[in-house]
Amino acid sequence: MKETGSEILNGNKEGDEEGERTYVGTRGESIIDYGIVNEEAWEGIESFKVGERVESDHMPLEIKIKGKEQEYETQERRNERKEIEKRIWDEEGIQRHKTRVEKRNST
């Protein structure tokens, strides 16, 4: 990875010093999912952590990126946030999503 200027976050950043496993399944446990950044982005990564999940064999990779926090939120942004549609990802919700995507792609 060094020759390409890339760095692996797993086991090398605060939060995952030990290099936690990212896959836990019937075939065993291993680190098969990676967080990779270029050298410029390395310092901008505040922490890297392998989360927990029960609905998948693969654990989520949680990457916290340094940046300025926004001190205020405009009324427009608050209204926008309220309009976000929440979706339930059960079988019916998945089918509705597929239908929307197919409809969007056919136009």
Image (cartoon, rainbow, N blue to C red):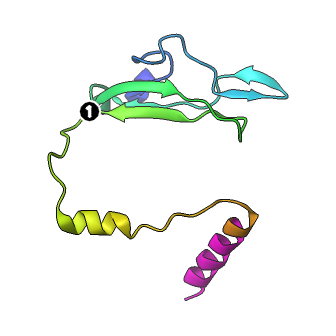
Foreground pick, 16 / 75: 75
Who's the residue at 42% across and 21% down the image? 2
Foreground pick, 2 / 89: 89
Q: Position of residue 54 (x, y in %)?
A: 70, 36
The answer to whether any part of residue 79 appears in the image is yes
* Image quadrant where residue 91 sits: bottom right
In the image, residue 44 above or below residue 92:
above
Work out which residue is located at the far bottom of the displayed protein and give it: 107
Who's the residue at 19% across and 56% down the image? 73
Work out which residue is located at the far top of the displayed protein and give it: 18
Q: Which residue is mark 1?
A: 66
Q: Position of residue 57 (x, y in %)?
A: 73, 35
Horizontal relation, residue 70 to residue 27: left or right: left
Q: Position of residue 11 (x, y in %)?
A: 50, 15
In the image, residue 91 above or below residue 42:
below
Horizontal relation, residue 40 to residue 15: left or right: left
Q: Is residue 101 magenta?
A: yes
Q: Is residue 31 magenta?
A: no
* Image quadrant where residue 90 sits: bottom right
Q: Position of residue 37 (x, y in %)?
A: 40, 32
At label 1, counting other C-alpha atoms closer than 10 Å, the crowd grade (few under 14, some 14-19, many 20 or more) is few
Horizontal relation, residue 22 to residue 57: left or right: left
In the image, residue 14 above or below residue 38:
above
Magenta: predominant secondary structure element? Answer: helix
Quarter of the image with the C terminus is bottom right
Foreground pick, 89 / 21: 89
Secondary structure under the numbered disc 1 in the rendered image: loop
Circle 1: residue type: Lys
Who's the residue at 44% across and 18% down the image? 15
Q: Which residues are magenta?
A: 94-107
The answer to whether any part of residue 8 appears in the image is no
